Image: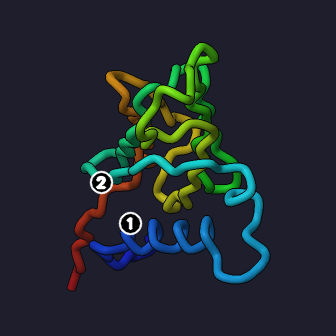
């Protein structure tokens, strides 16, 4: 049985690595920067039996969201579309971002990729990533 070290900041470290990958320094920004107009704010929580990701995506239709998992990387992409009847000249200030978004997260080895689920409600996307069922530790008696 393999022992795993508990690292309470591992999810934050993974998030930081993903952010660095999304916005690398230098000329080659990669696919994510080239295809993303904005990045939704994301909260990641670890429960006893799952990792839960919440992304703020107000104004995005659920059918315009794609959640994809491949090679241990969870990708969330979509698009916030603008209304075609807008008259730009009447706006004094525009702060709501339109266009495509793209976020990627490396999943831990304990994630069960086959059981990932996603739902969108009230402008928040929830992605639930269950943990794999693991063998419970047991005490082995030593005979003398």
Mark number displayed over residue 121: none
- The residue sitting at 45% across, 66% down in the picture is 15
Residue 70: percent from left, percent from top: 69, 48
- The residue sitting at 62% across, 55% down in the picture is 73
| Quarter occupied by residue 30 | bottom right
**SS at circle 2:** strand
Q: Residue furthest top?
A: 85
- Quarter holding the C terminus is bottom left
| Quarter occupied by residue 54 | top left
| Quarter occupied by residue 78 | top right
Residue 131, above or below 64: below
- The residue sitting at 56% across, 74% down in the picture is 20
Residue 28: percent from left, percent from top: 78, 75
**From the viewer's perspective, is 135 left or right of 60?**
left
The alpha-carbon separation of the residues under discs 2 and 1 comes to: 8 Å
- First-in-chain label (2 vs 1): 1
- Quarter holding the N terminus is bottom left
Residue 11: percent from left, percent from top: 38, 66
- Is residue 128 visible to the viewer in this orientation of the structure? no
Q: Which residue is mark 1?
A: 11
Between 51 and 132, the one nearer to me in the picture? 51
Between 87 and 136, the one nearer to me in the picture? 87
Residue 23, above or below 97: below
Q: Which residue is mark 2?
A: 46
Q: Are marks 2 and 1 in contact (CB under 8 Å)?
A: yes
Residue 3, above or below 126: below
Q: Residue furthest bottom?
A: 144
């Amino acid at each position: 049985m393999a022992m795993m070290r508990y690292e309470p900041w591992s999810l934050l470290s993974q998030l930081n690595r993903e952010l660095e990958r999304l916005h690398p320094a230098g000329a080659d920004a990669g696919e994510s920067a080239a295809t993303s107009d904005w990045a939704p704010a994301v909260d990641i929580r670890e429960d006893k039996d799952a990792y839960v990701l919440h992304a703020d995506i107000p104004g995005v239709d659920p059918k315009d969201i794609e959640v994809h998992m491949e090679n241990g990387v969870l990708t969330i992409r979509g698009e916030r579309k603008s209304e075609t009847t807008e008259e730009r000249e009447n706006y004094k200030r525009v702060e709501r971002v339109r266009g495509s978004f793209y976020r990627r997260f490396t999943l831990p080895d304990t994630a069960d990729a086959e059981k990932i689920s996603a739902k969108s409600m009230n402008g928040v996307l929830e992605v639930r990533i269950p943990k794999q069922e693991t063998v419970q530790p047991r005490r082995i008696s030593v005979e003398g």
